[in-house]
Image (cartoon, helix red, strand yellow):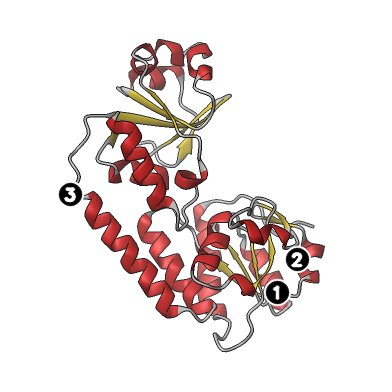
Amino acid sequence: MKFFAGIGWKKKAAAFFFVLLAGSVCAGEAVRIVSLSPSLTELVCHLGGKNCLVGRSSACDHPAEIRSLPTAGDFARPDTEKLLSLRPDAVITCDLIVPAAANALARCGIKVLFLPCRSVSEYREACAAVGKLIGREGQARAEMERIDSFVASCAKWKKLDRRILCLIWFKPPIAAGENTFLAELVALTGARCCDLKGTKGYFKPSAEFLLGCGADTLLVFSDPVLCREHPVLRHTEAVKKGRVVHFSRSELLQRPGPRFTEGVLQLRKALEK
């Protein structure tokens, strides 16, 4: 049996409110945590709580020392038997929580924190929640202050005349729309996204969208040669003019964790060329 599966926002909201009602693990206890999201695993370690982690998802690979931890399933998809064998006090995840899963874990005495990180603001909220969970409130406040300072410094940068479409995959094309962490990071660089036509979240753009969105630059995370070989992308303004930015360290921009600031700095430099 799998606890977690993809659901709509209403059920996710219900799960989140269940967590609020369920309460949190006392910071004074020796908290045992299983993290099912790479970004939250990084955040726990960044705040000094690495020793609280007793399990991770197979996608959690940073910092390197946590790779020795036992896996309790894949990203947001736990292996129930393995997870329970680790005897965690709490499970933290960014995505794919269902109310039934929270209830089932609660019956086993396990708290669930659903911490979506779809924006910088939500990342700050995750900092506060994780800091409270592991008894590192001071470190969490310091991290939030670091983020606020970074965002303020980005606002002083000269604006870049770039209209960007972020493609996280090619077969089929998958793009970052409005209300995504990636789109917000593009804005922090001083550039702007192309006309997303009100499309929110991650989506599969049609040929008409790709040719009509007005993007003069493509941000990609796979081999840019695939753009030139794609039957539609090769006809876009960005590809014709060679304005394809290949960002090889995708985790810096696609994971809403502590290292996103490094990703923004690297992307800014790439776009200035």
In percent of width and height, residue 174 lies at 50, 31
Callout 1 crowding tier (Cα within 10 Å): few <14, some 14–19, many ≥20: many
Inter-mark Cα distance, 2 to 1 = 8 Å
In percent of width and height, residue 24 lies at 55, 80
- Discs 2, 1 touching: Cβ within 8 Å: yes
**Looking at the image, which residue is at 33% across and 15% down?**
237
Callout 2 crowding tier (Cα within 10 Å): few <14, some 14–19, many ≥20: many
Residue 156 marker: 3
- Discs 1, 3 touching: Cβ within 8 Å: no
Inter-mark Cα distance, 2 to 3 = 46 Å
Closer to the camera, 18 or 177?
177
Q: Amino acid at mark 1?
A: Pro
Nearer the observer: mark 2 or 3; the answer is 3
Q: Secondary structure at mark 2?
A: helix
Q: Amino acid at mark 2?
A: Leu
Note whether 103 is above or below 270 in the view shown. below
Place residue 66 in its image quadrant: bottom right
Inter-mark Cα distance, 1 to 3 = 44 Å
Residue pointed to by mark 1: 88
In percent of width and height, residue 250 lies at 50, 40
Residue pointed to by mark 2: 83
Please state if 226 lies on the left or on the right of 184 as rendered. Answer: right
**Looking at the image, which residue is at 27% across and 61% down?**
149
- Quadrant that contains the N terminus: bottom right
Callout 3 crowding tier (Cα within 10 Å): few <14, some 14–19, many ≥20: few
